[in-house]
Amino acid sequence: MALAESALREAIEQASRAQADLDRRVFHLKALHDVACELSGLTQPRKIMETVLLTAMGLFGVTCGLAVLINVRTRQGHLAQRGLSGPEAEDCERNLARIAEHYLPEDSLPLHAEFVLPAKTADPGLLPADTAVILKQKVDGSYALLSAVGPRLSGEPFGEADRTALLNLAGTMANALAQNLFHREIQHLSAGLIRQGDELQVAQQQAGRARATLDRQIFHLQTLYEFTAELSPLVATDKLLEAFLLTVMGTFGASRGCVLLCDRQRGTVLSAGRGIPGPRELSLEEAEKLLYRGFQATEERRLAPMSAGFILDPPSVFPESELGFAVHTAALFTVDDALLGVVALGPPLSQPALSAETRELLRGLTVNWMVFLKNARAFETIQALNEDLSRTNADLRRTIADLTEARHQIRILEVAKIRLKQLIQREVERAGRFRPADVILMVIISTVLALAFNYTSPNGIPVLPEAFFQAQAPRIDALTAHRMLSRSEAVLVDARPSELFQQKHIAEAVNIPAALFDVIFPMKLGPALKPEQVVLIYGRTFSKRYDDEVAQRLLQRHDQVRVLEGGLAAWEEKGFAVSP
Amino acid sequence: MKWPGWLKASITHPLLGLLLRVYVGGVFIYASMYKINYPGEFAETIASYQLVPYWAVNFMALVMPWAELVSGILMVLGVRTKSAAAAIGGMLVMFSLAILITLLRGIPIGCGCFTSAEEPLGWGTLGRDLLWLTMTLQVYFFPSALQLEGRLVKSLQEVEA
């Protein structure tokens, strides 16, 4: 019975302890539930941590506690404490980075709350000295939570249930902080989205305006492009005026308009008009006055070359009576100092006034047109210069031809001069010097003159002796001749000159020199000569064949003619008589 | 042998050269005239010397007077004076040799120097030719005054300058 009672009491005690344990657990859970409910309404991390700390201090009867929420990457965070002295709190606040480095390294953070053991030995003095329990937990990808509580007022150690409750409480705090951080992140993102939405709206508005501006600019550029394309093939100034006026009137919807161009350099005024009765022809002075009034009323008062300026209050400057229509818009333009003008448009059909951009378009068209106008003027100038150049080239070609001819003549003269100089030098060298060539030349000249003169002279003689070409008379030897003479069958004739005859001759010979044959032959021999008698002839020298010469003449009068072979020498050789 | 200065100056004087040039040249011009007009007679004269082959006598009788005339004119005018003097000198040497040979051979002929009807050839004729030859040598070796070619050359040099 006693055993039963003791067993009962023991069972009752066990039941009581179990009941107490259950009650404590229920109390803990209830406190946990309460704090969870309370945390759901908090939005500040510090408030969450302070609330949990207060709950833990009340729940476990501890003297102090702290919680640190730290960004493990930046080492920055929040500290919440209860029951710490002022210096301890300041130390903890100051050592947040070191606390995070020591207790919350990024690579060893648990997803659920864990105790950091042993708390005393591992603490390097960063936390209060009487810290009893330390817990750490990863809150989210960037934040970690360190919780610590001091000793209990009762001095009792933390039991298993207390430790579980602490873990749950720390986990609840971590969840609340995670939700809070997530909520804050959501809020931050939402605010960013709202802000970006506002910015997007502003950007859309700006884009709309930019698009409208771009459309206008595209229209303007398109207009300028088409205008440029239209002007490109035109090179005549009057055509450019017409094209410019039509384009401007079409672009701005004006039914009337005119363009006036004043060329001070050439002293001319060109104009074009549309929709008006007929543009009045202006003189240069009238155009200058009109432009002067226009310049007085322009916005800029003074225009740089290749620029245009609008006239303020055009109707007052150009009255309807002057241009023939009511001017709504007018712009002056200056190509250069010598070329300037004005374009005037009547009221547009659609809009009452031109906007600033439209005016800029008109200015752009005008400036663009001026470029073509300047090019056209330059082209005209180039054409004129080309014509002058062609004429100059023709003159130059003629000059070059003349110069070439002169150069050719100069070259010929130079060659002649060189040759003349060489001739002079040669003659100078030859002068006063004996040259065999001169003697040969004299002989040649003499020969030519002699032959020519002899050919025409009545006293001319054959170049070679006649006997050289005639057949020889019959020959007779000295012995036969002597025999014939001794028989008186022949007569002997000495044909040599008388000087030679007198020097030596054959004793029976009759001297009839060849040169005097016609005179002496009739006197000495002619009448006495019988036809049957033979005439023997002798006498020749190294230089003259007198015997052949006389024989040829005698043969014309007498048949029996013989020439003594060997002459006087052969006669003497035979020993026949000679005289003297 | 050193010549006296006055003698050398006299012999080489340009005026003496001019005188001799005109004289010898004039003699040759004069001598050529008759022979040019009567070449037949001159051919007989050449033949009488018996020194020229019979086939060359007529040709020589035609050409030689013209050679005398041309060289004589050039010498008188002072054109190619040295060449003309050389030609005349050569002809005088030829004439002198012919006369000498003829005299030695004893052929009784006339000189034929100017006309065909002249006195018989003699030593005087040879001396005369040698005297002319001496004059010609003076003209050849020493300058003479009033040479047409010299004046012409001088004028050309002035033109060239």
Image: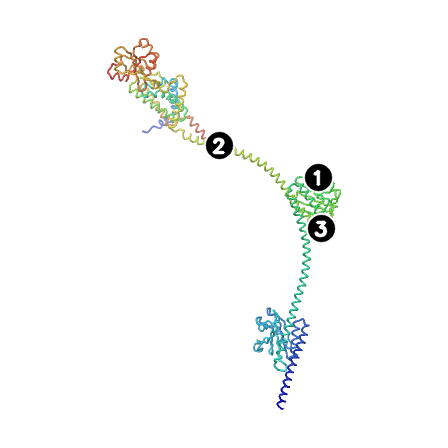
Percent of width and height locating residue A450: 39, 21
Residue B63 appears left or right of A374: left
What distance separates the C-alpha of mark 3 from that of mark 1?
34 Å
Q: Nearer the viewer, mark 3 or mark 1?
A: 3
Secondary structure under tag 2 reads helix
Percent of width and height locating residue A336: 65, 44
Who is closer to the viewer here, A119 or A25? A25
Q: Amino acid type of disc 1?
A: Ser
Pointer 1 local density, CA inside 10 Å: few below 14, some 14–19, many at least 20: few
The residue sitting at the bottom extreme is A1
Q: In terms of sequence position, does the residue under pointer 2 or pointer 1 come before the other? A: 1
Looking at the picture, does residue B4 appear above or below residue A105? above
Residue A580 shows in this picture: no
Q: To which chain does the residue with label 2 belong?
A: A
Percent of width and height locating residue A547: 31, 16
Asked if labels 3 and 1 share a chain, the reply is yes
Q: In terms of sequence position, does the residue under pointer 3 or pointer 2 come before the other? A: 3
Who is closer to the viewer here, A10 or A410? A10
Which residue is disc 3 drawn over? A355
Q: Amino acid type of disc 2?
A: Ile
Q: Quadrant of residue A129?
A: bottom right
Residue A404 shows in this picture: yes
What distance separates the C-alpha of mark 2 from that of mark 1?
63 Å
| Image disc number at residue A391 | none
Secondary structure under tag 1 reads loop
Residue A120 appears left or right of A258: left
Q: To which chain does the residue with label 1 belong?
A: A
Which residue is disc 1 drawn over? A283
Which quarter of the rendering shows the N terminus of chain A? bottom right
Which residue is disc 2 drawn over? A412
Q: Amino acid type of disc 3?
A: Ser
Residue A569 appears left or right of A421: left
